[in-house]
Each structure stands twice: as structure tokens, then as C-alpha cells.
Image: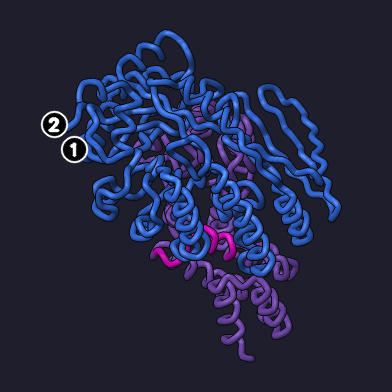
Chain colours: A blue, B purple
Amino acid sequence: MNLRENAMAVFHHEKPERIPWWIYDWAFPSFLPRGSWERELRNKGLCLYGLDKFLAGGPSYTIETPNVEVVQRSVAQGTKKVVTTTYNTPVGSVSKKERLDLNYLNPWTMEFMIKDISDYEVVKFIHEDTTYRPNYQAFEDAERNVGDDGFCVAAVGYTPFHEALFHIMGYQRVAIDLYTNPEEFEKLFRVVEKKFYEVCRMVADSPAEIVQMGDNLNGRVTSPRLFERFCMPIYRKATQIFHQKGKIVMVHMDGALDCLKELIPKTGIDVVEAFTPPPVGDLPISEARASWGDKIIIMINFPEPVCLLGVDAIKKCTLEILRSIAPGDGFMLSITEDIPQNILEESMRTITEVMWEHGKYPIKL
Amino acid sequence: MSKIEILNRLRDSVENLDVKGAEQACGEALDARIPAYEAVTDGMAKGINIVSEKFEAGEYFLLELIMAGEAMKAGLKILEPHLKVGEIESSGRVVIGTAKDDLHDVGKNIVVALLKSAGFNVVDLGVDVPPEKFVEAVEKEKPDIVGMSSLITLSMPAMEATIGAIEKADLRKRIKVIVGGAPVTEEYAEKIGADAFGKDAVEGVRICKTWMGGR
């Protein structure tokens, strides 16, 4: 099996030759740089995961807001850049401020679009004004570029509650408005939800076999009560849209999941991506498997702080993970978080070597 | 309404994450001539303790902690002008910040709110705090405790660099260092020479209280 076939076997609940071990396929500013050690590791089974939104052609859909003027101003601060984006609409203006770091892929939002109750109308307008168009060629290009060295996934974006948490309002404002302005929050939520399903339908018609909802789900933030209210119905409906078109559905759930473990299988999703076991997460792999049965594929995120503890700790942790998943049905191993550049090679090399030596299916450890 | 009833309302408003209720109860406390420090210590602070217990029991989550902090903040805004200097004995002095290159502040802000409600005097250095700024603050503020948080692995080495810088400035012996944040582990805290690791805000504050002997 080549790396793609090996990974796809797991996605289809078949037996792989090896436990797939992957890293996101974007070279800079984080994750796997290109060069000799990268080639060496990929020849030892390190698989590429291309998430289309981070690849050259962008996601499998494009966005237009014909009635919103978007103005950007950026200020350089050494290796960092602060970008202020202002959205001017017929119902008013909002702005957000982000810091981009050369060493870090995702921008950090310093000021969110919604700062005040009066901003809701504007943000609703921006979402209602948004139209989507297919960009399927970009996905096909990305998949061709990865070829047999891995697999590509179509990103759908964040589900509405997590969109509010991470991109529209931030944790603080979500908390305040859930308690003090619940009607406004709910109205905005419904608008974002409606647009989210539009994206789902468009991605469902794309050539992608696997789709991903971003979410960064963390039970410490999205409590069971919030999950049942704001996430469960969305996951169910989105999954239904995708399953009707034969897609495999994954959600990026890299936080603490213990309090959500009973609820997650009720969503109907197929894959939990970036499942982070202790010491960073709070749900041991064995408990997750026991709660979820064989139905859900678990893509384990190697708990990246272990990389800061040195080679022996990395080896020990990789072996522990392999032991805990033996014989290995329905599992993959990955790194989904950034690792400091000065220890990236030794970390990746150590995990790859342990996987090469002990990661053959069925695992015998 | 009796004094006990007003204090209970203060406690309940924080426990029930009711910002407006906290403001109202603070107004009632002042109208009833309840000393502001009693309204804090025997009212709202008790509410925060209950919130912390509920968080540890898995009844409350991060958003509830944020809201409890908001209720406390709203109440303190009303009571603070009526607090006499030195009326509330400080539990200790804490310098706190998010490590260099990290802009996450929600967790750190919750710790600050909980520390304040536990009677600590807190100097919040904000986010993306370089080691030299921590050193400067330790020299100037003379804290009992330095708290650092990191939410991304890339900024974790900055916590080690900060402890190193504090040591180099010969200030380490006079302070305790506590670290926290989602990717931080007990093992890592030990490796970088921190005195403790708080797995969450509530545990972090409990450790600080223990260090100060519950004073």
C-alpha cells in the first residue's frame, strides 16, 4: 500500500499495513519544512494531510460579499504584523484586529468584530450578504499535488458556535452575551447557521472524499449543555448533508473531551481529528474507544508538549500511544500543533522512527 | 432586607452569574450601610468560592467562570470607592502574565479574577510578556508569587527563559513560580524549574493560597 491507500484503508474501516502517521502538508510558517530530512522521514512512512484551505488554491469554495467594502491596514512590528480589517456595510461598520506572526500559521485575533451589542446587525448583514461559489479545481489540484504521499481534505470552516468563539466574538463576549443578550446571540447564530449549511452543500458536491469542520472543540469551553444546544444539531444536519453525498466527515476536536465523550458519537460524525490524549487532553485513548466503539475513527494528536521534554520522553510517549491502541483498528497518529523549530526535526524523526519500527498493523507491543 | 439576606444575595448573584443582580445587591449593601469589605468578603467572595467548587465538580465550565468574574467585576466597581485602604488584608502579591509570543488571555484573566476575589493583590502584566518585563516587575512590585500562562507550545520555552532571567537577576529565591495553560504539564513545569503547575484556574489559586498559608 502507498501512503494514500494506507490512510484511506483506515477511513474506510479496513485494515492498513501500518498505523498511518501524518502531518499537515503546509510547509511554512509551521509544520513540515521541505528538505532532506523531510524527504527521509516521508520515505519512512510519514504521510501528508492536505487541508485545502491552507493550500495554494484555497478551499473548495470562494466567498464574495458584494455589498460590503473591506478595507485593510497593516502595521509591521518586526516578525509580526498587525492587520486591522474594517467592514463597511449599508447598516454600519465593524472592524477586527489581528496579529500575524511569521512563525505561526493562524492569525491571532486581538479585537473581534463584535465588541458591542450594536455590532450584531452589521455582522448579520455581512453573513447574509455572503455568497459562495465552487472552487473545485483547487481541490483537484491539491489532491494531485499530494498524490500517493497522503490525502486531501476539504475544509468546511467552523460550525456557528465555534465561529462565534474563534472568529466573530471571542470567548469573553460569547459568555457575556449568552447571559445578557441571548436573543441577539441566537438571531446571529441562526444567520450563521443558515450560511454554514450553504457551505456544507457546496462542499458536499465537491470532488473531496473527506470533509473537515474546524471547530477546535474543547469541552472546558463548550460544555455539554452548550454542545447539546449549539453543536449537536449542527453536526447532525451537516453530517446528514455530507453522508447523502458519500463523504467522510471529520471534526477537529483537540481539547478536553471527557465531559463530551457520551455526546460525540450521537453527532453521527465519522472521524475525530486531533484527539489529544493526556497529559494535554483529559480523555485517555482507551476510554474514548470504549465510549465510541469502532464507529468513530480516532486521529490522535501527539501531545506536543512532550516534544519539549526530549527524545527519550518522545519515544516513551509514542510507544505508550501504540500500546494503548493495539492492534490499531481505526486509529491514526498525527501532529496537529506547532512545534518550536529548534526541536522540530528531532521530534519528527523520533516519532517517525518509532512508528517505522513498531507501527506495523497489527501492533504487537 | 436584613444584612444576612443582602450578603446572601451578593453571594447568590455571583454564583448565578448574574451581573445586574450583583450590581443591585452591591447598591443595597451600601444603602444598608454594610461595610464594603464585608460585602466583598462575606458576600461576593463566597459566591466565587461556590463557583470554583462547581467548576471543579464539572457543573460549571470556562464560560461560567468568565461570567462569575464579570459579576464580581461589576460589583467591585460599585464597592471599590467605599473600600478603605488596607481594610482588606492582602492574601499576598502576585505578578502574572501570558508568556512571550502568546496572546491568549482568557485563562489568565480568570486566574486574575479568582486571585483578586481571594484577596490577592495582583499585578497583571497582560499578554506576550517578555522575560525582561517579568524581571522588571519582580524587582519593582516585590511579589510573593509569579504566575505565567502559555496556551501554545511555541511560547512554552519563553516560560523557561523567564524563570532563567529571574534567576540571573538573583530574584528567584524570594518568589514562588506557578505556571499553567492547556499544553503545560506537571512534568514540563518541573523541568523548567517552576515551583508548581496549576491544571486550571481554580487549582492555581488554591496553590497560591496554600503557599501564603491562607493568610
Q: Residue furthest top?
A: A36
- Of all chains, the one bearing label 2 is A
For residue B186, side relative to residue A217 (left or right): left
Q: Residue at x 45, y 52 (%)?
A: A239
Q: Which residue is located at x 48 percent, y 14 percent?
A: A34
Q: Nearer the viewer, residue A24 or B135?
A: A24
Q: Relative to the observer, which residue lies in front, A320 or A297? A: A297
Q: Position of residue A248 (x, y in %)?
A: 40, 43
What's the residue type where badge 2 is placed?
Lys
Circle 2: element type: loop
For marks 2 and 1, the one nearer the N-term is 1
At x 24%, y 37%, the residue is: A14
Counting from the top left corner in percent of width and height, residue A45 is at 31, 20
Name the residue tied to disc 2. Answer: A364
What span is colored magenta in the figure? B58-67
The residue labelled by disc 1 is: A326
Q: Are marks 2 and 1 on the same chain?
A: yes
- Magenta segment, prevailing SS (helix, strand or loop): helix
Can the viewer see residue B131? Answer: yes
Residue B66 covered by magenta stretch? yes
On the image, the x and y values in percent for residue A144 come to 47, 21
CA neighbours of label 2 inside 10 A, class few (<14), some (14 to 19), many (20+) = few
- Whether the residues at callouts 2 and 1 have beta carbons within 8 Å, the answer is yes
Residue type at numbered disc 1: Ala
Q: In the figure, is residue A47 to the left or right of B45?
A: left
